[in-house]
Image (cartoon, rainbow, N blue to C red):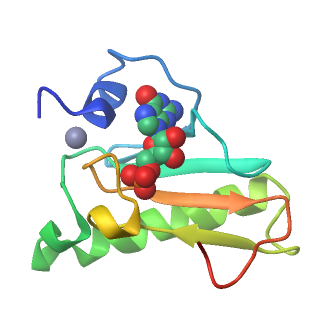
Amino acid sequence: MSDCIFCKIVQKKIPSRIVYEDEISLAFEDINPQAPVHTLIIPKKHISTLLDIPEDDSGLIGHLFRIANKLAKDKGIAERGYRLVANCNPESGQTVYHIHIHLLGGRRMHWPPG
Ligand code: 5GP
Ligand code: ZN
């Protein structure tokens, strides 16, 4: 996707603070952090929304969650607690249409979310 900002981050055409990378996924710091820890975990391949995840790609999603959990441990927030968020479509607040998991932590989270 030539006009997708996260695809450009994957291709290193836009700079980002990358904290993890492998063949199928990338994690980088959110440009507008909402908590002391706010990292985005994305698949390298373009998928616009959660609704567009192919049926045979459940392994990819499991992988993204494993990376998120690993980063929570690495960043020292695993025991205190952290939140994983994935927004889908406008009412959820999705603004970038390349799926991503938000890893949020380092402060007390509120529930219900806004
Ligand atoms: P969404 O609202 O789609 O769930 O989350 C998109 C997230 O991407 C937001 O938290 C926003 O701050 C982040 N974001 C948008 N553009 C960029 C960018 O160019 N670089 C980085 N690192 N994060 C971005
Ligand atoms: Zn993309």
- Please indicate, yes or no, whether residue 57 appears anywhere in the rendered image: yes
Q: Where's residue 88, x and y in %?
A: 30, 68
- Please indicate, yes or no, whether residue 21 appears anywhere in the rendered image: no
Q: Where's residue 79, x and y in %?
A: 86, 75
Judged left or right of residue 62, residue 3 is left
At x 63%, y 67%, the residue is 69
- Kindly indicate the quadrant of the structure image that contains residue 50: bottom left
User: Is 24 located above or below residue 19 in the figure?
Assistant: below
At x 21%, y 46%, the residue is 45
At x 66%, y 49%, the residue is 38
At x 85%, y 70%, the residue is 108
Q: Where's residue 46, x and y in %?
A: 18, 47
User: Is 83 located above or below residue 27 in the figure?
Assistant: below
Quarter of the C terminus within the rendering: bottom right
Judged left or right of residue 106, residue 63 is left
- Kindly indicate the quadrant of the structure image that contains residue 109: bottom right
Q: Nearer the viewer, residue 53 or 104?
A: 104
* Total numbered badges shown on the rendered structure: 0
User: Is 80 located above or below residue 20 in the figure?
Assistant: below
Quarter of the N terminus within the rendering: top left
